[in-house]
Amino acid sequence: MDNLNIFWHNGKVEYKDRCKHLKQKGMVLWFTGLSGSGKSTIAVQVEKELYKKGFVTYLLDGDNVRYGLNSNLGFSNEDREENIRRIAEVSALFKDAGLITLVSFISPFRKSREFAKQKIGSITFVEIYVKADVETCAKRDPKGLYKKVKKGVIKNFTGISSPYEEPENPDILLDTRELSVEEAANKVIKFVLNKQR
C-alpha cells in the first residue's frame, strides 16, 4: 500500500480522556484456545458479569466476525494470520475508545498473538489461555466440527491437521477440564478488577 498520501489525523480527545469519561481503563481480554475449549462460553459469562458491575464492554467472537469483517477469509495459514491481524487492529481501536473488549478467537499462532499484544499495548492486553486437550474438545464438540473433521469434510482444522501453538506464559490460564464456566469467569473478573484499580 502506498502511504505517501495518507496522514495520521490527531483528535482532541485521547485514550486517557475516554477512560476518565467512562470511569474504567480500556483493555483487551484475548481468549485463545482450541475449538470447543470454552473460549466463547467463558467470554460471554465474563462480559455479562462485567456489564452487571457497570463496565462498558464489547465481545468480538471469532465466528461472528467471520460473518462480516472477515467473511472473505478462509482457513489457510495466511488467512488465519490475516484474520488475527484485522481483529487486532479493531481491538486496538476499541481499547482506545476506552472499552473492555473481549476477543474470543482460536488465534493459533504465537506470532499473531504477539502482533496483537504489540498493537494493543502490553499493559492493556491480557492473554487468556483457555486450555483443553483435543480429546476433551472432540468429546464436547458443541458445533459438530470434530465430527466433520473425522468424516473429512473439514480440512486444516486447528489442533488436528493445522497447528496450535500454546501460549508459553499467558496472563491467565483456564484449564476447562478442571474449572466450571463460573469458576473460570470469576478468575478472569478478579484479574480485571485488580487491573482496573
Image (spheres, rainbow, N blue to C red):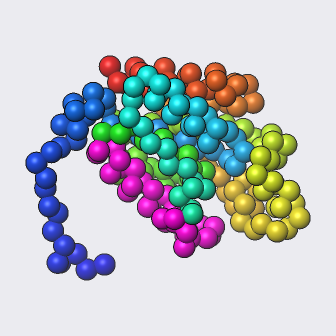
Q: Quadrant of residue 132?
A: top right
Question: Toward the viewer: 30 or 99?
Answer: 99
- Extent of the magenta region: 68-97
**Residue 82: image x %, image y %?**
49, 65
Quadrant where the C terminus lies? top left
State the residue at coordinates (58%, 31%).
45
State the residue at coordinates (57%, 55%).
64
**Can I make out residue 75 in this image?**
yes
86 is within the stretch colored magenta: yes
State the residue at coordinates (60%, 51%).
106
Q: Is residue 174 above or below residue 87?
A: above
Q: Quadrant of residue 147?
A: bottom right
Quadrant where the N terminus lies? bottom left
Is 53 positioned to the left or the right of 46 in the image?
left
Q: Is residue 177 above or below residue 86?
A: above
- Of all residues shown, which one is farthest toward the right? 151
Question: Toward the viewer: 171 or 9?
Answer: 9
**Can I make out residue 118 in this image?**
no
State the residue at coordinates (55%, 46%).
104
Dominant SS type (magenta): helix
**Residue 178: image x %, image y %?**
73, 25
116 is within the stretch colored magenta: no
Q: Is residue 122 above or below residue 51?
A: below
Question: Toward the viewer: 52 or 44?
Answer: 52
Q: Quadrant of residue 90?
A: bottom left
Is 41 positioned to the left or the right of 19 in the image?
right
Q: How many numbered dots are placed on residues in this image? A: 0
**Residue 97: image x %, image y %?**
29, 44
**Residue 120: image x %, image y %?**
35, 47
